[in-house]
Amino acid sequence: MADAPDAPQPPGWGAPQPDTPAPGAGVPPQQGYAPPQGYAPQQGYPPQGAPYGYNQHPQAYAVAPPGNGLGIAGGVCGIVAVVLCWIPFVDYLSIVLGALAIIFGALGIRHANEHGGGGKGMALTGVITGIVALVISVLFLAVVYAAVTSIQASIAIPGN
């Protein structure tokens, strides 16, 4: 079946339709103002709210537990001290790091007990590894000192 030659063609995209009014025609413009005092808002229309971005309720965010920087510092110092206590000329540094780990760990445990939050395990790790590193470093230095003095005594130069 062929189209009849007298049939109207549908309008293309964006072309105005012949029977529809233009947008906004016949509709009074809305004002964003409140009615004058003593007058209620028009019936049938809800009161106009605030524009987007104003008067929004704040969102609730999850609060992170308070940190324990001293406990973390103690744990890190203690772990590094245990690693370094086995190296011959670096174990002097391990003594200092072990002492710092014990001090920071003890302060971190006290902070965690008073204020709550995390980091108590890391502070306890700092105290324990600090003590272990300090003991190993002191024993290692005592053994090295004893070995050096015994070698030095056996190689004593006669006549001095």
Image (cartoon, grey):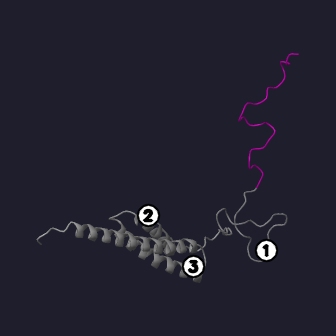
Q: Residue at x 60, y 73 (%)?
A: 65
Between discs 1 and 3, the one toward the N terminus: 1
Judged by depth in the image, the label closer to the viewer, 1 or 2, is 2
Q: Which mark is residue 39?
A: 1
Residue identifier under label 3: 112
Q: Residue at x 34, y 64 (%)?
A: 88
Which is nearer the eye, 117 or 80?
80
Q: Is the Cβ of the residue at disc 1 closer than 8 Å to that at disc 2?
A: no
* CA distance for labels 1 and 2: 81 Å
Most extreme residue toward the right is 1
- Any magenta on residue 19? yes
Q: Is the Cβ of the residue at disc 3 closer than 8 Å to that at disc 2?
A: no
Which is nearer the eye, 94 or 143?
143
Residue 123: image location, x then y, percent: 53, 74
* CA distance for labels 1 and 3: 61 Å
Q: How many circles with numbers are drawn on the protein? A: 3
* CA distance for labels 3 and 2: 26 Å
Q: Is the Cβ of the residue at disc 1 closer than 8 Å to that at disc 3?
A: no
Give the main secondary structure of the magenta stretch. Answer: loop
Q: Is residue 117 left or right of residue 50?
A: left
Residue type at mark 2 is Val
Question: Which secondary structure lies at badge 1?
Answer: loop
Q: Which mark is residue 138?
A: none
Q: Which region is colored magenta?
A: 1-27
Between discs 3 and 2, the one toward the N terminus: 2
Residue 53: image location, x then y, percent: 64, 63
Q: Residues within 10 Å of mark 3 (few under 14, many from 20)?
A: many
Residue identifier under label 2: 83
Quadrant, the N terminus: top right
Between discs 1 and 2, the one toward the N terminus: 1
